[in-house]
Image: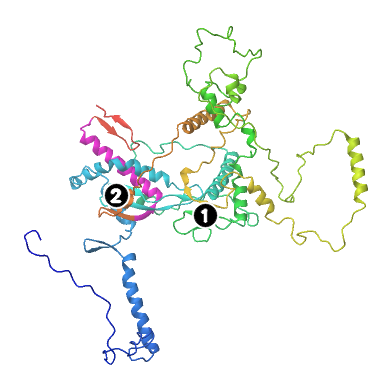
Amino acid sequence: MWNGVPPPPPPPLQMAAAPPPPGTTVPGAGQPPPPPPPPAGASQGGKPLTPMELEAQLVEKARKWHQLNSKRYGDKRKFGFVEAQKEDMPPEHVRKITRDHGDMTSKKYRHDKRVYLGALKFVPHAVYKLLENMPMPWEQVRHVKILYHITGAITFVNEIPWVVEPIYLAQWGTMWIMMRREKRDRRHFKRMRFPPFDDEEPPLDYADNLLDVEPLEAIQLELDEEEDAAVYEWFYDHKPLMKTKLINGPSYRKWHLSLPIMATLYRLAGQLLSDLIDRNYFYLFDMESFFTAKALNMCIPGGPKFEPLYRDMEKGDEDWNEFNDINKLIIRQPLRTEYRIAFPHLYNNRPRKVKLGIYHTPMIMYIKTEDPDLPAFYYDPLINPITSTNKVDRRERKAAEEEDDEDFCLPEDVEPLLKQTELYTDTTAAGISLLFAPKPFNMRSGRTRRAEDIPLVSEWYKEHCPPAYPVKVRVSYQKLLKCYVLNELHHRPPKAQKKKHLFRSLQATKFFQTTELDWAEAGLQVCKQGYNMLNLLIHRKNLNYLHLDYNFNLKPVKT
């Protein structure tokens, strides 16, 4: 078009085909349409398939489906070759490695020294995981999964101690009872001294000293087969109810307990739980009151005392003071600390960063019964009815009501609603008690938590310390309460972070293997490894004048 060449003619418009003239025949016209494809169960010849052929077709379909889905459950592939899943090694493998690396000064292990020093930064995490999975007093022995380096440089406990919170609290409640009995009945009660071994005594070898020794008996409260029938069979098991419908499965992340089980656990955990259900008990002893007392630089009786939040509290206005201020409220009686905290804007000159607490909550009329034989709906004598002051009017009104009632009567065929339903069952009283129970006993289901995340006795210092307790206990309560208030005051919502799985990434390498060991053996290995690492670090830094003993104390070398 630009070089003078005429453009090509446009393509002819495709018009609808005109009908053929009369008398002409078009091939294919007037014939019936082609037949539909044969159904799945028929052969190409139109004959139905035999049962043998149908079964062969199903087998072929199953083979193709299995071939397509085999990748989902198969071994991991990486750049064309199959990476097989690691199998657990026998415990003797890691025992031999640890025993051989007992003395790292040998030239035989000069290449492993660098690995040991590099593993030093993982020692805090190894100690943390070891303490996290510590066996409980009611367990005779605990076997844990282990992730270890092939040179014996470091050993990790590769488990998370998930526990069902109501069961865990009940177990520790029974331990509290056993501890008090032991302290009462044992004449020569002595607490253990730490560290238990001498400074120059090396850690014991598990295979030589402890492998064939029968462990001590576990501390367990003897349960009653009738009263504690709901939990009698599995109460002291490691990860109880694992293979039942009450737990979601091997992951052990969700639980759902029945009413008899929860009632029994609540009774067994009673030693650790508070009996206070009325929130009015915590008036001027709750978090808002502590925040206000801290802001006003005051101390609630029995509560913590903080440093002044504002240093200018004592400075007055130069022009106006308490004698000539026309806006000043003159109060003739001394102001108590409780008044200033309960009504901070009324009784303080400069209330800054104060919190207003709840003045009153509805009263709870529930009274916990100690006798299990009482009916579920029992009127406790502690709840006294409020009598009327004018008894004469009440008697006259009652007589008038009785006269009016004589004229009315129900027909004979009238029956009360829910006549056939029982007023209460065997679990009604337990259900009412669980309704007013503290968390987690007022829940039917929940998620498992790590054992170290469950507070056992933190509710004790959040209440008023009984006056009969010694001074050291009151001081301890105040210190714990001060730390708790500061943590609540400075708490910020955690930032979203990407979840990292250290053990998964380590296990995927060729340098780490897995096995299962006794927890005590894993602890002895971590102690030996930490000692070897620190010794190598001392020699690397040429600190030859320092000596590290087996209790991790640094001492000067005798000269």
Q: Amino acid at mark 2?
A: Thr
Gap in Å between the C-alphas at discs 2 and 1? 40 Å
Task: Give the side of residue 224 with respect to residue 298, left or right.
Answer: right
Helix, strand or loop status at disc 1: strand
- Could you tell me what secondary structure mostly forms the magenta stretch? helix
Q: Indicate whether 429 appears above or below 249.
A: above
**Residue 349 occupies quadrant:** top right
Q: Which residue corresponds to mark 1? A: 255
Q: Which residue corresponds to mark 2? A: 98
Is 535 in the magenta? yes
Rendering colour mode: rainbow
Quadrant into which the C terminus falls: top left
The numbered mark, 2 or 1, whose residue comes first in the sequence reads 2
Q: Position of residue 296 (x, y in %)?
A: 53, 21
Q: Nearer the viewer, residue 161 or 152?
A: 161
Q: Nearer the viewer, residue 477 or 486?
A: 486
Q: Which residues are magenta?
A: 515-544
Q: Position of residue 382 (x, y in %)?
A: 75, 39
- Residue 368 visible to an observer of this rendering: yes
Q: Position of residue 198 (x, y in %)?
A: 37, 37
Q: Indicate whether 269 appears above or below 15.
A: above
Q: Nearer the viewer, residue 193 or 169?
A: 169
Do the numbered discs 2 and 1 sit on residues whose CB atoms are within 8 Å? no
Tell me how many marks there are: 2
**Residue 28 occupies quadrant:** bottom left
Q: Indicate whether 105 appears above or below 71.
A: above
**Can you tell which of label 2 and label 1 is closer to the viewer?**
1
Is 517 in the magenta? yes
Helix, strand or loop status at disc 2: helix
